[in-house]
Image (cartoon, grey):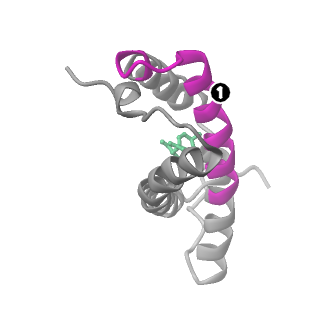
Amino acid sequence: MSRAIDNVKQCQSMAEVRAGVNALDDILVPLLVERSGYMTQAARVKNDEGLVRDEARIQAIVDRVRPMAEAQGGNPDLMERLYRAMMECYIDYEHQELARLRAAGLAPKDDSAGSAA
Ligand SMILES: O=C(O)C(=O)C[C@]1(C(=O)O)C=C[C@@H](O)C=C1
């Protein structure tokens, strides 16, 4: 099986290093934008500020990506830190998107059953 780490080219200069990084960012940025689109979907489907952060799902994602990173010749601890930091940013964005959707007319979930006041 070919591993991602084996695709890294031996570099003699920082220009080569940065060309390699830029080429990967060209792939990563569209994927991260696409991932952010699912935060908008999640905001609309959950429609509840209290549900945006889901610790069980965060842990499940970490548990999934650590072995994936290892299989690709990467460092699982680094991947976990990247994913946890990235998901914090996406959680902020999901809150932002829920507020935007509410301002645009998304009705808050009916809380009459749970509201005491
Ligand atoms: O799966 C969800 O519930 C999401 O909202 C997505 C996502 C993520 O994958 O970044 C973001 C917030 C949650 O805390 C868990 C995961």
Instruction: Identify residue for label 1.
Output: 81
- Amino acid of disc 1: Arg
Taking the spot 49% from the left edge, 62% from the top edge, the residue there is: 33
Judged by its main secondary structure, the magenta piece is helix
Q: Position of residue 38 (x, y in %)?
A: 44, 57
Quadrant of the drawing holding the N terminus: top left
Choose between 79 and 37: the one closer to the eye.
Answer: 79
Choose between 70 and 84: the one closer to the eye.
Answer: 70
Residue 114 is at least partly visible in this image: no
Taking the spot 64% from the left edge, 45% from the top edge, the residue there is: 14
Is the CB of mark 1 within 8 Å of ligand 1? no
Q: Residues within 10 Å of mark 1 (few under 14, many from 20)?
A: few
Left/right placement of residue 68 relative to residue 10 reads: left
Taking the spot 47% from the left edge, 19% from the top edge, the residue there is: 66
Q: Position of residue 67 (x, y in %)?
A: 40, 16
Which residue is the extreme one toward the bottom? Answer: 104
Q: Position of residue 65 (x, y in %)?
A: 44, 25
Q: Position of residue 13 (x, y in %)?
A: 61, 43
Callout 1 secondary element: helix
Query: Is residue 90 magenta-colored?
Result: yes
Taking the spot 59% from the left edge, 74% from the top edge, the residue there is: 101
Left/right placement of residue 6 relative to residue 36 reads: left
Which residue is the extreme one toward the left? Answer: 1
Q: Is residue 36 above or below residue 3?
A: below
Quadrant of the drawing holding the C terminus: bottom right
Choose between 96 and 90: the one closer to the eye.
Answer: 90
Q: Is residue 45 above or below residue 11?
A: below
Q: Which residues are magenta?
A: 69-93
